[in-house]
Image: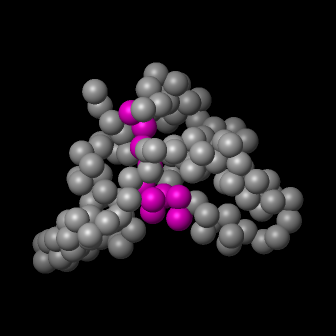
Amino acid sequence: MTRYLLDTNIISDVVKSQPSESLLAWMSRQRDEDLFIASLTVAEILRRVLEKPRGKKRDALDNWFSGPEGPQALFAGRILSFDDKAGLIWARLMAGGKLAGKPRSGLEGKMAETQIEWSAPNPAGRAPR
């Protein structure tokens, strides 16, 4: 069994008016119980919705986000949290990257940490586009 941690870009692509056909095909071959998102992904998606100017597009995104097709509903029981163990892994990843001359952004580091803690590969670079 392979579990996948889907990042924000994958979730965003799926809800576009014209999502990537190859991504949809890849996702259709996966079992729902093998697909996960991080709590930080939920937060990032909501932030993007709230940053949109008020209007029809934002209202539609807000309705999607909080409705039965939104990330919290679709991934209920499969949202991985950022807890104290995750925080320790994150600190090591961030410090190691900086010391190696390859600093990471805070959010990318937190996503990588969640991926490591939960042993869930991120298909973002491998899913056909």
Magenta: main secondary structure equals: helix
For residue 122, what is the image quadrant? Answer: top left
Pinpoint residue 37: horizontal percent, then vertical percent: 44, 49
Quadrant (top left, top right, bottom left, bottom right) of the N terminus: top left
- Is 117 placed above or below 20 here? below
Pinpoint residue 22: horizontal percent, then vertical percent: 52, 29
Residue 51 makes an appearance in the image: yes
The one of 21 and 114 positioned closer to us in this rendering: 114
- Is 70 placed above or below 45 here? above
Residue 101 makes an appearance in the image: no
Pinpoint residue 106: horizontal percent, then vertical percent: 35, 73
For residue 100, what is the image quadrant? Answer: bottom left
- Point out the residue furthest to the front here: 77
Please tell me which residue is depicted at 63% across the width and 38% down the height of the picture: 19
The one of 32 and 50 positioned closer to us in this rendering: 32
Please tell me which residue is depicted at 38% across the width and 53% down the height of the picture: 80
Pinpoint residue 51: horizontal percent, then vertical percent: 68, 72
Please tell me which residue is depicted at 24% across the width and 54% down the height of the picture: 117
Q: Which residues are magenta?
A: 34-44
- Point out the residue furthest to the right here: 56
Q: Is residue 13 within the magenta segment?
A: no
Q: Is residue 39 within the magenta segment?
A: yes
Q: Is residue 106 left or right of residue 27?
A: left
Please tell me which residue is depicted at 20% across the width and 70% down the height of the picture: 88
Q: Is residue 18 left or right of residue 44?
A: right
